[in-house]
Amino acid sequence: MGNSLFGIHGMALEVRAQRLGVLSANIANAATPGYKARDIDFASALTALSQGSDTARAISSATRYRVPVMPSLDGNTVEMTTEQTAFADNAVHYAATLSMLQDRVQSVTRALKGE
């Protein structure tokens, strides 16, 4: 998304969407032996994007393995309460960012129509 029209919100939406995918993968693999839960450091990814990094590189450099509070015996590091909380928090922020972008698009549309 372009930086000029949507500003930081366009980049934030991209990072939040990618993070939803990572958190979903963690939840889907909660019972997979040896699966290592990951998360995206939102601030790091957003900083990298705002400094001109491409999305794939920014997300890759900001992705971290999660350190479990209570490691499981099978090596899986997914803790469902942590993942569900992170997913819900990120989803709320995603919706808020999307709402801001929709408002921006509506404002631009009204300005173009001369309203």
Image: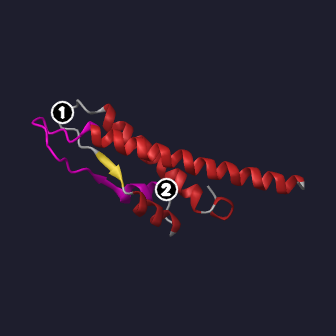
Where residue 111 sits: x, y (%)? 83, 57
Question: Residue sitting at 88 percent across and 52 percent down?
Answer: 113
**Apparent side of residue 76 relative to residue 108 in the rendered image (left or right):** left
Q: Are marks 1 and 2 in contact (CB under 8 Å)?
A: no
SS for dot 1: loop
User: Which mark sits nearer the N-terminus, 1 or 2?
Assistant: 1
Q: Which three-letter amino acid code belongs to the residue tagged 2?
A: Thr
Quadrant of the rendering where the C terminus is positioned = bottom right
Q: Residue furthest top?
A: 31
- Position in image of residue 105 (x %, y %): 72, 51
Rounded to the nearest whole Å, what is the CA distance between mark 1 and mark 2? 30 Å
The label on residue 91 is none
Q: Nearer the viewer, residue 111 or 32?
A: 111
Above or below, comparing residue 39 to residue 81 in the picture: below
Q: Is residue 98 magenta?
A: no
Q: Hey, what amino acid is under mark 1? A: Pro
- Tell me which residue sits at (46%, 66%) in the image: 47
Instruction: Find the magenta span and give its range.
Output: 56-80
Q: Quadrant of the N terminus?
A: bottom right
